[in-house]
Amino acid sequence: MTRSTQWWQDAIFYQVYPRSFSDSNGDGVGDLAGITERLGYLELLGVDALWLSPVTVSPMADHGYDVADPRDIDPLFGTVGDLDALISEAHSRDIRVTMDLVPNHTSNQHPWFRAALAAAPGSPERARYIFRDGRGPDGAEPPNNWPSVFGGPAWHRVTEADGTPGQWYLHLFAPEQPDLNWENDEVFADLAKTLRFWLDRGVDGFRIDVAHGMAKPAGLPDMDITHNELLINDDDDLRFNNPGVHAIHRRIRSVMDEYPGRVTVGEVWVRDNERFAEYVRPDELHLGFNFRLAEAHWDASDIQEAVDNSLLAVESVGGVATWTLSNHDVEREVTRYGTEAGASREVGLRRARAMILVELALPGTVFLYNGSELGLPNVDLPDDALQDPVWERSGHTERGRDGCRVPIPWEGSAPPYGFSTTPDTWLPMPDDWADLTAEAELEDLDSTLTLYREAIELRKTRPEFAGAAIEWYGAPPECLAFRRVGGRLSCVLNASAEPVALPGGEVLLSSAPLIDGKLPADAAAWLA
Ligand code: NOJ
């Protein structure tokens, strides 16, 4: 651990979705000991840090994003001792470990929320959450018209101790995830305790869930609702990005600053660049997720715009750009690119391989989602396997996010592919993944895993990757080409249907074999 305190500025983070990574105890759900057993693989891949999606105590209404005790590990995943072991083993391999932190809401099973339900309206217990009387003569209408992100209203009416219908509480996500009242100082005091609890155990930082949430507008006014789909994020959505959020981030940062070398990255769904930049001012978050690249279509100008926008978003505050092609909330890139007009899964994989070269050529911090290095597609799950609360809450109109959360195939030719010892994995695994296991891909020089390993190795070792700026240069139609201003690495992407000539220079790596020296369609190359 000798690198700089700002190690995260060009780091490659690997997001582990713990339920789906590796199951050490045969219950069909991944766990911490499973992750520790696989650290050798992650070291071989070459990542600098892990981001663990929530492993704290949770009834799992939203798979851990409903936290009932933020300072203990859920038995499903192991113990605090298992996390200690993971951290120390990871550190000995020079891999840092960051955890998810969920400050916007708790579980409805959190002792605070249970106490709030047992207490009377107006009590200090209720003041930790956002309880309001309903509208209408009997208070039978919700306090405002906000929808929950997962569908249905954002308010749930409680039954008071005397059995009568009572107040309503706010839940921007599932009813099992009541929103905390960030105007109550107890809430920050408790979060500070949580931050220190894990930082003292050696955690290297936090991914902050809904980092543009927490603060709510005064008076909780009605909003103009035009649509309310998951991951459609409007800057004029009153539920998020209220100016009061920045004071909260400054308080979080003041705790983080007591621990040099630790990092925060916020989930910030804010489109306007000036408002996005506010989150990564020097006294707020270290990093903010920018999702433009994950949203870009397979189109050279769309991708170029996403890159420019992400760089521009942090420029005014001297922040570090972040790059994400996928995570546990979005469709996997192989499927995204493979379902655009005229494409197929095979084409989707070619494009995903090309995009990892674009992503890893860029200056800033990269976030990889587990399984992307194997080229995993989304899985079409049967209705009765679906577990995402979105499926029920939307009245079975949105299938939710389970398709990108299917367990990782490690070895062998049939489910559960070494993920677990039981075939009864928490989400069923497809029968046709034998070629996509880590074992199969480690041995295959043309595999996606090999491409990732080579690309990460080059990015870490070659001087061409120096410098914080890029410049675009002329490229054929439906292609893009940029250069790192410092080290002069060139990256060329061919999103057209025909092979294109490459500029002069040594080809360091390409996502598909060149054809007579030309870059084929749906491919990218790096040149020195
Ligand atoms: C964002 C997380 O990434 C997502 O998985 C979760 O459902 C919501 N926040 C609510 O915590």
Image (spheres, rainbow, N blue to C red):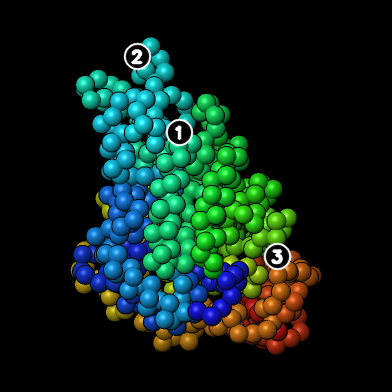
Disc 2 Cβ-to-ligand 1 distance below 8 Å? no
Tell me where residue 397 appears, x and y as whole percent: 39, 41
Residue 478 numbered mark, or none: 3
Q: Secondary structure at mark 3?
A: loop
- Work out whether residue 469 can be spotted: yes
Q: Residue furthest front?
A: 258
Q: Is 451 situated above or below 314?
A: below
Judged from the image, the secondary structure of the residue bearing numbered disc 1 is: loop
Alpha-carbon span between mark 3 and mark 2? 61 Å
Q: Nearer the viewer, residue 465 or 496?
A: 465
User: What mark, if any, has residue 147 been given in the picture?
Assistant: 1
Marks 3 and 2: CB-CB under 8 Å? no
- Circles 1 and 2, Cβ within 8 Å, touching? The answer is no
Q: Is residue 525 left or right of residue 418?
A: right
- Residue depth check, mark 1 versus mark 2: number of the one nearer the observer: 2
Q: Amino acid at mark 2?
A: Asp
Q: How many marks?
A: 3
Label 1 to label 2: alpha-carbon separation: 21 Å
**Percent from the top left, x then y, of residue 42?**
42, 77
- Give me the residue at 59% from left, 53% from top: 284
Question: Contact, CB < 8 Å: mark 3 with mark 1?
Answer: no
Going 25% across and 60% down the picture, which residue do you hit? 76
**Residue designated by label 2:** 138
